[in-house]
Amino acid sequence: MQKQRHLISTFFFFFLLSGIFYGVSQTSFGMSTRGLAEVLLTPLRAGIQTVFANSSGKSSLLQQLKDENTDLRSKLAAYQGQAKEVQALRDQFAVTSINTQTLLPAKIVGHRSVLSGFSLPDQLILDKGKLDGVRDGSTVVYKDIFLGQITRVTDHLSVLDLGYRKNFSLTASVVDTGALGVMKGQGQGEMLLDNVILSDSLHNGSNVITKGSMDLTGKGVPPGLLIGKIISIDKKPSALFQTAKVGLALDVSRLTMVFILIQAH
Amino acid sequence: MFEGTITSLPLVLVVLILMSVGLKKADVFLIAFLSGLLLDVFLVRITGVTGIFFLSILLLIFLYNKKYETKSLFFVLLATALSVIFYLFIFPTPDIFLQVIISTLLAGGLFSLLGLFFLKKGTTHQAL
């Protein structure tokens, strides 16, 4: 009976302590203390992350060719986007100005997948946070490729939800045909371009880019970032919309560093 | 450390369940509290929330232990499966089914191994 009382009292003690930590963590003191812990632990995590990234991602000729291919696709998408812009300017003399954005390099310190090397992660933890200018909803890219958006931020760390994560969606367009749709994450590296009207044409191999969803403050996803390429099309005359499966533009599991788009002040 | 960095498998939860079944001491609460805090920092969660979950699960296991025998493979598998499902429901990660299966098998495997190890140790002591 005494043992049981000791057990219950120990439980309540630590439960209360956890509750106090929960409450204090919302205050500025709690956040700065947490920030200190993040700063101390991040190098260790980065080291583990580097070891596992290096051991699972040895470069080979095939991998180099894949990287070059990704690079060229990114450039092709940018070129096609620029060609359309030039045409639009010529036609209408429209001038738009987008707030200048700066790229903040961020190391990946958490690479959470069920089994590293066998399944793709759908979230990455980055070593940049509020104190570095990262905000909830910040877009993350690698070269000109859209990776995802920041969903949680602390003083020194942030969580990136990758574009193929389930329940993630954003507006997208096909570069060569201009077809518009909604890119929906399906998990495990798969994405679906949905809600494309039947009259729009889709082709296998076409590049898909972000349509853009920036607000007046410059927050949101900028247009023109490469998402991937169409690998299969599902078009039924009886359906309202057609869909297309989109393959990733790069192998996320091999990344060690990404770039966060920060609003310049 | 691995759970916070390279895998989303709830390894800490599995270890805590095994410790609570094997040791049956209140010290496990301290380990649950500290590991919960560390995980909250690694996984960018609100500080204390993981610890609250771990403590609650361990209390349930200890209370169950008062009435029934918990040092059995069946209990370890069941407790792990249910705890992991609940954990992944509260802290969503993809592939819940796969994670539950792997965690349960891991817990069962570790429990069997540790059981064999302590059984052998007990036999050696008896022989001496």
Image (tube, coloured by chain):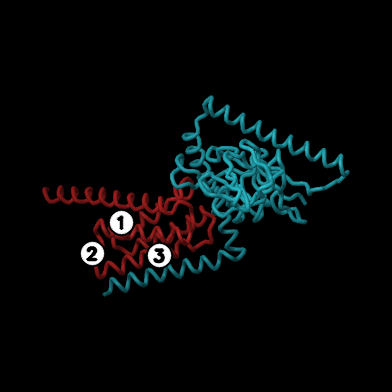
Chain colours: A cyan, B red
Mark 2 / mark 1, whichever is N-terminal: 2
Label 3: chain letter: B
Labelled disc at residue B55: 3
Q: Residues within 10 Å of mark 1 (few under 14, many from 20)?
A: many
**Between discs 1 and 3, the one toward the N terminus:** 3
Local packing at callout 2 (Cα closer than 10 Å; few below 14, some 14-19, many 20+) is few
Residue B79 at x, y = what percent?
33, 60
The quarter of the displayed image where residue B85 is located: bottom left
Q: Position of residue A73 (x, y in %)?
A: 65, 33
- Residue receiving disc 2: B69
- Return the disc, 3 or 2, that comes first in the chain's sequence: 3
Closer mark to the observer between disc 3 and disc 2: 2
User: Please, which residue is most extreme toward the left here?
Assistant: B127
| Chain letter of disc 2 in the image | B
Q: Which residue position is annotated with label 1?
A: B77
Residue A223, placed above or below residue B37? above
Specify the amino acid type for callout 3.
Leu
The residues tagged by marks 2 and 1 sit, at their Cα atoms, a distance apart of 14 Å
Residue located at (45% from left, 58% from top): B88
A236 relative to A216, above or below: above
- Residue under disc 1 on the same chain as residue under disc 3: yes
- The kind of secondary structure element at disc 2 is loop
> Residue flagged by tag 1: what amino acid is it?
Leu
Left or right relative to A265: residue A164: left
Q: CA distance from mark 3 to mark 2?
A: 20 Å
Closer to the eye: label 2 or 1: 1
Does the CB distance between marks 1 and 3 fall below 8 Å? Answer: no
Residue A56 in the figure: left or right of residue B113 = right
Q: Which of A249/B51 is in front?
A: A249
